[in-house]
Amino acid sequence: MPDSFMRTKAKELFGVDLPPMGEYAVSNVFFPPGNDKALVDCKAILERNTRDRGMTVVGWRPVPVDNSMLGKDPIDSEPVTEQFFVTNSGPKKLSQRQFEQELMLIRKMTEDETNGMLGPESGFYINSLTSQTITYKGQLTPEQVSQYFLDLKDPTFISHLALVHSRFSTNTFPSWERAQPIRMMCHNGEINTLRGNKNWMYSRGGIMDSEVYGDNTSHLLPATSDNMSDSGNFDSVLELMSKASERSLPEAVMMMIPEAWQDNDNLSDTKKAFYEYNSCVMEPWDGPAMVAFTDGRYIGATLDRNGLRPSRYYVTKDDHVLLSSEIGVCPELPDSEVKIKHRLEPGKMFLVDFETERIVPDDEIKEQVASLNPYKDWVENSMIDLEAWTKSTGVKSSKMDFSQTNRKLNLFGFTSEKLEMLLLPMAVGGKEALGSMGNDSALAVLSEQPRQVNDYFKQLFAQVTNPPIDPIREEIVMSLVCPVGPEGNLLSQPSKEHCERLVVRHPVLTLEEMETLKNYEYKRPDGSSAFKTVVIDSTFPVGSGPDGMLHALERICDEAAEAIQGGLGAGGVQGVILSDRLAGPDRMPLPSLLAVGAVHQHLIQTKQRPKAAILAEVGDAKEVHDYATLAGYGCDGVCPYVAYEAICKMNADGLVEAKAKQQFSDEECISNYRKAAAKGLLKVMSKMGISTLQSYKGAQVFEAVGLAEEVVDRCFTGT
C-alpha cells in the first residue's frame, strides 16, 4: 500500500487524516461502463456491508486514467474505476488479522449481492480490499499500465514491494477483471486439474466451517467459479485458506502446490509427514506453474514439482530483490551491483519476510511450517493402509470357476483381439503391448459395432506451452498413491482426524483387497468404526430398456447418498462399492463409467462427495483407457474381476505359457497386469502434464465425442 500517496489523497478529498498503516484499506473497484444506476447501487451495497460489519466508510475517489492508447476491445469494455477508502475505527477496534478477515467477508458479501442483481460478469469487480496491498490492472499491455493509470506516475506513489504480471489469456476469454495480478497472487502456467479442483472445492462446501467466521462461512462459499480463470480460482482458494483458517500464506501455498515428496529421499521426515498429512486434506493443484504471491507481510514465489516454468532471482548489493520468469527484465542493472544470482528450483519456494526483514531459505520456512504439529505421529497412527489391512485379514481369493467365463466375456464386451492383443501382453510382460501404426479404428460414434461408453471419450491434450512429463525418467515426481474416504473440515485446526483416511497405493484393486473392503470393517483401537463400506448393485432387469437403465442410475445415486448419510442414530459408511457381480441372464450391468460418473456428480451436487470413497467392482474395465476414464470421473479404486478371470483362464488354457515361453502362476499374471495398468496410467497422466493420480482423479480431462447431451449433463457434468 503506497501509504504517503493515500494519506495525501484522503486529506485533499475528504479532509481526513488516515490512521496508521494497517488500520485503513483502499480498494480499486471496477463498475460496469455506461451504467450510472449500477454504479450508485453497487456503491450503496458495498457501503452498507462495510458499516454493518463495524467499519467506517471514508469515501470514494475517481481514479484518473488516460485511455488514449487503448484499442477497440479494451475501450468497449473499459470499466469506471473508483477507489474506496475504509478505516478500522468502528465501535470495536479489531486486530490487524481480524480487520483483514472482515474486509474479505465484506467483499464476498458485496459480490454475492451484486451478482444476484446484475449477473456474474456484469463488469462490477472489487480488485482487492485489504490494508496491505492495492491492485492496478486491466486489459492492457505491460507498457500501457503506467500510461493508463496516472496514479502510477505520481512521485509520491511509493511502495516497498510490487507484484507485476503480464500474460496472454490462454485458456479463458480476456477481460478487465481477469487480468493479473489477482488478489494475492499472479501465475505463469496452467492448472491442468482445474475441473477436478473446482468440483472438490464445491463439494467441500458441505463440510467446511470456519472458526473465524462461524455462521458467516456460507458467505465465503463456493470459493471457485466457472466465471474465473484457473489463476482466479487458485487465488480465491488461497485467500480462503489463509484468511478463514489459522494457516499462514506460505503454508497454504505448500498445501496447494506441494513439492514431489512420495519418493524423494532428500526430504526430511518432518516435511514428508507434513505433505503426506496434507494430501489427506486437499489434492494438489497440478500443472506447470510459477506462482508469485503476497499478503503484505510476505512476498514470495514457488515453482511446480516438475519445474516446468522458468524463474530466476537477483539480490543486489543494496538489498533489492528481483524475481522474474525471464532474465533481463532490468537490462539497466549492472552485474557489478548483483550480490546473488540464482534460479528457483522445482518445488522450491523463494520467500521474503518483511516482519523479520530477510530472505527466508526454502528449507527453513518449510521445516518451520512442518514442525507446527506432530504430523509424523498423526500419519503413522491414523492412516489406514489398504495393503496392510488386507494382509492382516488373511483373505484369500477363492479358486476360479471358468464354466461361465465365456458368457461373462460376451456380456462385458471382451473380444478375442482385446484378450490376445491387450490383456495377454500385459499379463506376460508387465507393460502394454506396442503397436507401430497408431489407432485407426473408427470413432465410437461412427462405428458399426456396439462400443462401450469409455470409447466415446478422448483425453484432452495439454494446451499452450506444456511439455509432457517423462513417466519413466521422471518417476520421482509422479505418484499413484491416493488417500480416499471421508475428508475433514478444510478450514479447521489441523488434527489427527484429518488423516483418518484409507490409503490406496494402486487404483486397480486386487480381488483380496475388494473382498476385504466388502466384508470387513476397520476398527479404531477404541473399537469404533473407522472405515466400512456398503455394496450397491449396479445392474438392472433385462428387458426393462432405457427406462430400466435410468431408474437404475437414479437408484444407485439415492442408495449411495442414503448410505453415506446413515440412518437415525447410525453413522454413515465411509465407502460405497458399485458392483455388477449380479449381472447374468436376467440382469444387465450398468456401464461402469456411467454408474461411477452418475454417483460422483450426484454426490458433488449434494455436497457429500468428500464424505466417502467411490469404489467399483466391475466387469467391463479391462484396458488402461478404462481405468483412466474411471479415475478421471471420480472413481477411487477399481476391481476388474472379469479381466482377472479372463487372464487366469488364458493361463489355464496355456496361452500365457505359449507366449512367454515359461510358466506363470495366476498371482504373477495378475501382478504383471496391475503393473502394466499402473505404467499405462502414469503415461496417460504425463501426456496431460499431471503428476499425481490424486489430482487426476475427478479432473475430467476428456472430451466426449458423440454422447448425447443429457448423458453428459447427468453423468459427466462439465465435460
Image (tube, helix red, strand yellow):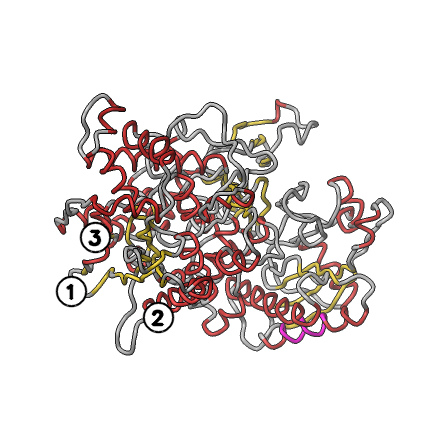
Which image quadrant for residue 44? bottom right
Residue 483: in magenta span:
no
Determine whether label 2 and label 1 are within 8 Å by CB: no
Please identify the residue farthest to the top as the structure is shown.
661
Q: Amino acid at mark 3?
A: Glu
Asked if one can make out residue 122 in the rendered structure from this viewpoint, the answer is yes
Residue matched to label 1: 527
Q: Residues under labels 1 and 3: Cα distance?
A: 21 Å
Residue 96 as seen in the image, left or right of residue 655: right
Q: Position of residue 281 (x, y in %)?
A: 38, 54
Q: Nearer the viewer, mark 2 or mark 1?
A: 2
Say which mark, if any, is on residue 562. 2
Q: Which residues are magenta?
A: 42-50
Between 314 and 715, the residue placed more toward the observer is 715
Q: Please give the name of the residue rendered at 59% of the width and 36% of the height, measured from the top-left corner.
A: 320
Q: Position of residue 306 (x, y in %)?
A: 46, 34
Q: Is residue 238 above or below residue 476?
A: below
Q: Amino acid at mark 1?
A: Gly
Residue 48: in magenta span:
yes
Residue density around tag 1, few if under 14, some if 14–19, many if 20 or more, within 10 Å: few
Please identify the residue farthest to the right as the structure is shown.
68
Q: Please give the name of the residue rendered at 83% of the width and 46% of the height, measured from the top-left corner.
A: 70
Please report whichever mark, 2 or 3, sits nearer to the chain's N-terminal start: 3
Please report whichever mark, 2 or 1, sits nearer to the chain's N-terminal start: 1
Q: Amino acid at mark 2?
A: Glu
Q: Residues under labels 2 and 3: Cα distance?
A: 23 Å
Residue density around tag 3, few if under 14, some if 14–19, many if 20 or more, within 10 Å: some
Q: Please give the name of the residue rendered at 40% of the width and 57% of the height, measured from the top-left corner.
A: 595
Residue matched to label 3: 515
Q: Nearer the viewer, mark 1 or mark 3?
A: 3
Say which mark, if any, is on residue 572. none
